[in-house]
Amino acid sequence: MSTPGLHEAGEGDGKGVDDTVRALLLLMPRMVGRAKKTPVPEALRSFSLAPRHLSLLSYLLLDGPTTVNELAVRLQVAPTTVSLLVGDLSRQGILERREDEADRRRRIVGIAPAHQAAITSWLAPGAAAWRKALAPLTEEQRQIFVDTLRAYEAAVGGGEAD
C-alpha cells in the first residue's frame, strides 16, 4: 500500500522502490544526526568553520597540498570562490600558501602543520567509515552509489542530476 502524498504515479517500480525509500527515510536522518554530533576538536572551535570549509579541508587532508584551481575543479565551484575560502582559512592560520617550486606564478595550498593533527582527528574517521562501507563494492557499484546520491541531491534541490 502506498502512502498518500509520498508516492507519485509512474515513479519507480512499485513496492520495491517504496520499500527502499522507507528504509532511506529512516536511515538518512540518523546519518545526518551522527555527522552533526561529530565534535569539532577544541583546537578548531574558535575558527567558526562552516560546512563549506569541510569539503575543502577534506580534499586537502586526503590528497595533500594542491592549487586553488585544482580545488575549484574538485569542489565544482569557481576558482574565485575557493580563493575566498582559502584566504579566510589562511588569515586564521588553518591553511598555508606557498610558491609552487615548478611554477613560481602558482600557489600551493595546504593545511598548516599546527592544525594538521586536529583536522585529521576530526575528518579522518568519516573518510575511514566511507572506505569501510564502499570497499566491498565494485568500482561500477561505487559509481552508481555516488550517481544516486547526486540524483537525490538534485531532486531535493529541484535541479537536474549531472
Image (cartoon, rainbow, N blue to C red):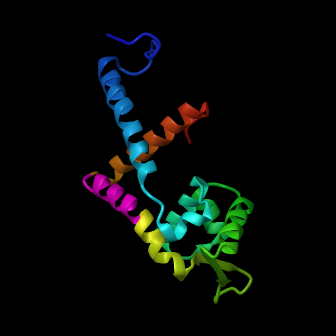
Name which residue lies at 71% across and 57% down.
Answer: 78
- Vertical position of residue 8 compared to residue 88: above or below: above
Query: Would you say 63 lies left or right of 144 here?
Result: right
Name which residue lies at 62% across and 54% down.
Answer: 76
Count the marks: 0
Query: Would you say 51 lies left or right of 36 here?
Result: right
Name which residue lies at 61% across and 60% down.
Answer: 48
Residue 37, position as x, y percentages in the image = 42, 50
- Vertical position of residue 5 compared to residue 104: above or below: above
Q: Tell me which segment is drawn in magenta.
A: 124-136
Q: Residue pushed farthest bottom?
A: 101
Q: Nearer the viewer, residue 54 or 43?
A: 43
Displayed quadrant of residue 7? top left
- Vertical position of residue 22 compared to residue 117: above or below: above
Residue 98, position as x, y percentages in the image = 66, 84
Figure quadrant of the C terminus = top right
